[in-house]
Image (spheres, helix red, strand yellow):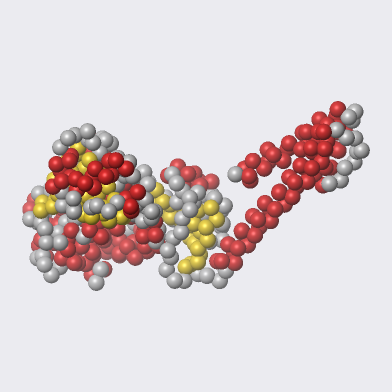
Amino acid sequence: MIKKLLPILAMVPLMVGTIGYIFSGEMFSNALYAAFALYFTNPVSDAYNISIEFARWTAPLVTATTILCALQSVWESLKCRIALLGKMDKVAVYSDEECHISFEKGVSAVYPGEKFRGYANDHIIMFSTDKKSLRFYEEHREELIGKNIYIGIKDLEIGLQKTVENVTFFNVNMAIARLLWKEIALWNRDMETCDIVVWGDGTLAGDIVCVGLQLNLFSLAQKVTYHVITDNELFQCRHSELVLMNNDELFFYDKGNPDIWNIVTKADIIIIADDLEAELLQTVVVKSGETPLYYYSPDEGDLASYLSNGNLIPFGRKIQVFTDDNIRRKKLIRKAIALNEHYANQYGNKKGWDLLSGFLKSSNISAADLGEVLSALSGKRSEDELMRLEHIRWCRFYYLNYYTPGTPDNGKSWDDKKRIHKDLADYEKLDHAEQEKDAETIKITMNLHE
């Protein structure tokens, strides 16, 4: 804060001193020069009054503070250079919040706040809002040419973003949602029927539902019912044409609906994606009984940590979310890139990974992610069932990215401008070639997880 105010504060002794010298009888130019000389403890006039005395003491303080700030900036830059010296994988993490990322061995990282450090190889930008992150990128866009850039977002949907060369967008909420569902792991439970409550108004609640719909696919006989309790109508509005392609169901309730407490009582799993007020949280805990209740808790020591009743399980802790795997996602992206390369070789798609849109990158990542689930199911489900589950995931991904069934006029299978695709249909209605694509996808993704 002091650094931002320093330019303004630095002018105060000059103005006060100049006024003091003018009142003592000096001409304006001489008064200005005499006041300026006070910054260097070198008075050029013997004049005296209260204004001059004030300037005589405060001007040197401004000079000293400026020198200390400059030295601090140089020292911080030097520390960053020393920290990255001799390292191959050099990462700079920019944020206006306190954050620490767990990197693998051999990675050297610095946290310069909002100060740009161009000597790093990779640059992670993750400010408190999407606007701040994107503004920081735009301010340093020229300096970032040729670098690997990772921008954290929370509100913008990756599937709707345009291609930005050398930039990988990672969605913090999506990372939280992926970790949550992999912890719950419905595919490892002996329950084909499951009622899940997701409570929340923010984008995190919507992302938990989106990721769950793509990962919780483990049986053709399953019936997973998602009860979303929210006063935010936008998610339901955006996905009004969503078709789940199986027996699963998705319902929305506003928080004033009296039926929600009966739903909470009967639920198999409850997920709280918002920071609830104490009275409401305690009511949910009492009504849920011993039902597993997962609550969003980025930091330890929150309100829910002190409740003794209920089966409370925190999720979204920064120490678990802020990891290299979740941000640069090298392991997962390597699998997605391998899948994209297969399709490029097989079907003549010449676009490399960096040139893919956010939508196509997300599509490959979604397929690679489900591959982990299918790999876990490989000894329990037939290949035909796994192919059908992959097709359901593929359809849901397209529906969640605002595509609808339709036959394009351009002779292709899809039209990105109209957001229609002819293969958004039941598996039995696909031609043999498209069914073979599903078979190839599960083989590739499952092999990647072996």
- Between residue 312 and residue 416, name the one nearer to us: 312
Asked if residue 319 lies left or right of residue 22, the reply is left
Q: Residue at x 68, y 41 (%)?
A: 7
Q: Residue at x 50, y 49 (%)?
A: 96
Asked if residue 56 lies left or right of residue 332, the reply is right
Asked if residue 404 lies left or right of residue 279, the reply is left
Q: Residue furthest right?
A: 46
Q: Is residue 325 visible?
A: yes
Q: Residue at x 67, y 42 (%)?
A: 6
User: Quick one: quadrant of the N terminus?
Assistant: top right
- Between residue 363 and residue 87, name the one nearer to us: 87
Coordinates of residue 231 in the picture (x, y in percent):
26, 35
Residue 23 quadrant: top right
Asked if residue 416 lies left or right of residue 432, the reply is right
- Between residue 393 and residue 27, name the one nearer to us: 27
The image shows residue 212, relative to residue 199, as above or below, that is below
- Between residue 292 and residue 351, name the one nearer to us: 292
Q: Residue at x 50, y 63 (%)?
A: 109
Q: Is residue 421 visible?
A: no
Coordinates of residue 437 in the picture (x, y in percent):
18, 59
Coordinates of residue 134 in the picture (x, y in percent):
46, 45
User: Quick one: quadrant of the C terminus?
Assistant: bottom left
The image shows residue 32, relative to residue 226, as above or below, that is above
Q: Residue furthest front?
A: 308
Residue 411 quadrant: top left
Coordinates of residue 244 in the picture (x, y in percent):
15, 47
What is the count of numbered marks? 0
